[in-house]
Image (cartoon, rainbow, N blue to C red):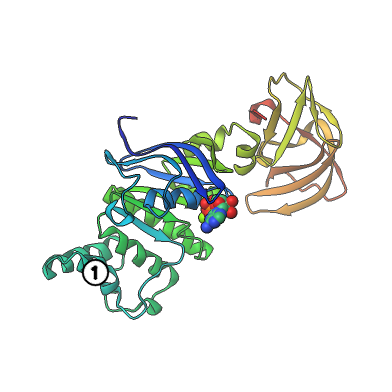
Amino acid sequence: MSDAFVSLSDLTLSYGQTVAVPDLDLDIAEGELIALLGPSGCGKTTTMRAIAGLLTPTSGKIVIDGRDVTRTPANQRGIGLVFQSYALFPHLSAFENVAFGLRLKKLPEREIRAKTEAGLDTVGLAGFEKRKPAELSGGQQQRLALARSLVMEPKVLLLDEPLSNLDARLRLEMRTELQRVQKDTGVTMVFVTHDQSEALALADRIVLMKDGRIEQLGTPDELYARPATVFAADFMGFENIFSVNGMELVSETGRLPLGFEADCPKIAWRPAGVTVGEGPHSGKVVASSFAGDHREYVLETPLGQIKADAPIEIAEVPAGAVVSFDLPQSTSRALAA
Ligand SMILES: Nc1ncnc2c1ncn2[C@@H]1O[C@H](COP(=O)(O)OP(=O)(O)O)[C@@H](O)[C@H]1O
Ligand SMILES: [Mg+2]
């Protein structure tokens, strides 16, 4: 608790009678990059709006840098916001877009110029000062929005799905860029996304949310390797999830012997964790697709369909053929319900 820079305690957030986020507790360290991850409607934006001061909590407390800001107006919290829509001023140059907030602060012109130039430089837009937003690419516009927030030297920078309007390649580029900017500036960042790969790539810690609650909180490594629940496992790419009953795997369609003891209600395998070509079980290949460094199979089995990735070195098993497979203990993940 004591070293938390942003602390949300017992936070309940509602729209009228509808509680969107009940009893949220979350501590964020200074300089940390936290990702709020979860499906649409799980309360990510609502949580961000509360931190920003755009939504008054029904109950609970928000502390930022040692100060209780629960009732503090948004513009006095020292928060920067970057959203999916960049909300840049179309008629202003890149320079003036970034300088805008500094001018409102009535800083001396020399200081405005220095900070604006440094901000543009930080996001790799030095030399683009005179361009209007329409003369910049989507990625550049997003970086401009980032610079505009950064020059205000916020205590916390909130980014709500900032990359979702960008195409796949730019999104990857911006990920790296955001990480670099965060390391360079040391600003505490809360980053919202529904994309698990984005959260895994960027965050120091991931807050996986479901129905307004924290389902699991951990480092990307932890969440990726050790999801604790069916929901978390599903979100992290464990596509084969079955119930365990004694020494058997059970699904709606049937059962299969489990080759080891598992003291858990559910168990899961990633497609890459399923062995294809050897093992005690057999399944019929219903689909096979080339995926570069591996081949993706869908097997029809007594448990229903199982997704399995096989190394590309293994000769392709054609659709319709029956193939041996294994669900090994070594790649399994035991889950709570
Ligand atoms: N202005 C609003 N009025 C009423 N309900 C809302 C409003 N905004 C969001 N909600 C509800 O609150 C829940 C959380 O929404 P939100 O925080 O926007 O989710 P996310 O950002 O994770 O997609 C959802 O059930 C949503 O329908
Ligand atoms: Mg949202």
Q: If the image is split into quadrants, where does the N terminus sit?
A: top left
Q: Is residue 65 left or right of residue 329?
A: left
Query: Eyeballing the image, is 91 above or below 149?
Result: below
Question: Residue at position x 47%, y 51% from top?
Answer: 192
Residue in the foreground of this view, choosing between 160 and 137: 160
Number of callouts: 1
The part of the image, by quadrant, that contains residue 262 is top right
Judge from the rendering whether residue 34 lies leftward or rightward of residue 223; answer left or right: left
The residue wearing badge 1 is 99
Q: Is residue 2 above or below residue 5?
A: above
State the image quarter where residue 209 is shown: top right
Q: Image quadrant of residue 260? A: top right
Res. 2 visible in picture: yes
Q: Is residue 148 above or below residue 318?
A: below
Out of 306 and 86, give the one closest to the viewer. Answer: 86
Look at 11% across and 67% down and name the residue there. Answer: 108
Question: Counting other residues with Cα less than 10 Å from the Cα at mark 1, is it few (<14), some (14-19), or many (20 or more)?
Answer: many
Residue 37 horizontal side relative to residue 79, left or right: right
- Image coordinates of residue 157 in percent, x first then y, are 34, 52
> Residue 176 at x, y = what percent?
40, 54
The C terminus, quarter of image: top right
Q: Is residue 40 visible?
A: no
Whole-percent x, y for residue 172 in the image: 47, 58
Amino acid type, callout 1: Ala
286 vs 204: above or below: below
Secondary element type, mark 1:
helix
Which one is nearer the viewer's eye here, 216 or 199? 216
In the displayed structure, does residue 76 sit left or right of residue 249?
left
Whole-percent x, y for residue 44 in the image: 50, 49
